[in-house]
Image: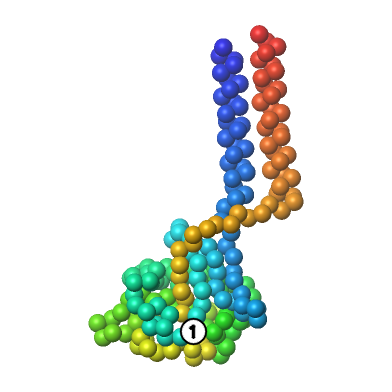
Amino acid sequence: MKKVFGVLKHKVRAISLMAMLLSSYSHAAFIKTYTGAGELSGAQQVNVAGDLWDVSFKTGSFLDIFGDVSSLAATTSVGAALFSQAILDQVFTGTDDALYTNTAGCSATPSCSALTAYGISAAGRVLFSTAVNAELESADLVGTGNATQSASISFGQRVWAVWSKTTTTEPISLSAPNLFSAVLTSLFLVFIFRRRANSVRRAQ
């Protein structure tokens, strides 16, 4: 009886390992989005402090795009800075880092700034954190700024970062080598616990 329980124990462990292995290939996929002209327009499933968010870059006034503070993802300067850092670390990367004018709404040098609004000051100005993608890599940074609510952000160097919570996640499709490896490992585990079960039956 102990041998049977031992085999069952190993079988459960093997199945658990298979489930963990296969589930590791179905995590959320970070995806950059582009306009029809090939300009960077935002990203989906951006990881901000452990949560997934979608972001889109838009030009226009705060009033036109947001209306008021009720739709803002961030409500403090610290929170807004986390969103800006996520843009620098995940969105303004690779070619989109080197060619900062490729961001939709940014067409002038020497930088492109994505603004994450987080509130209105006592004087009625919009407060925001900035993710600055500069011509000089060393000048890339997270900063702060403010503007009037009716000011149009369309100077060729600044865009609003409009955030919304990710509601759906798309699994990453397995490449052929990874799929083969996962299937091979699963079959090997099945072979092992079947062999153990047969050994116990013969011993009885």
Q: Which residue lies furthest to the top in this view?
A: 204
The residue type indicated by label 1 comes to Thr
Q: Could you tell me which quadrant the N terminus lies in?
A: top right
- How far across and down, in percent of the image, does residue 68 sit? 34, 77
Q: As displayed, is residue 5 above or below residue 18?
A: above
Q: Which of 170 and 102 is in front in this view?
A: 170
Q: Can residue 145 be seen in this view?
A: no
- How far across and down, in percent of the image, does residue 192 sit? 69, 27
Q: Could you tell me which quadrant the C terminus lies in?
A: top right
* Residue pictured at 52% horizontal, 83% vertical: 112
Q: As displayed, is residue 8 above or below residue 168?
A: above
Q: Going by the image, does 160 lie left or right of 202?
A: left
Q: Mark 1 points at which residue?
A: 59
Q: Going by the image, does 73 lie left or right of 184?
A: left
Q: Nearer the viewer, residue 151 or 187?
A: 151
Give the crowd class for mark 1: few <14, some 14-19, many >=20 residues within 10 Å: some
* Residue pictured at 42% horizontal, 86% vertical: 61
Q: As displayed, is residue 163 above or below residue 154?
A: above
- How far across and down, in percent of the image, does residue 139 sit? 51, 81
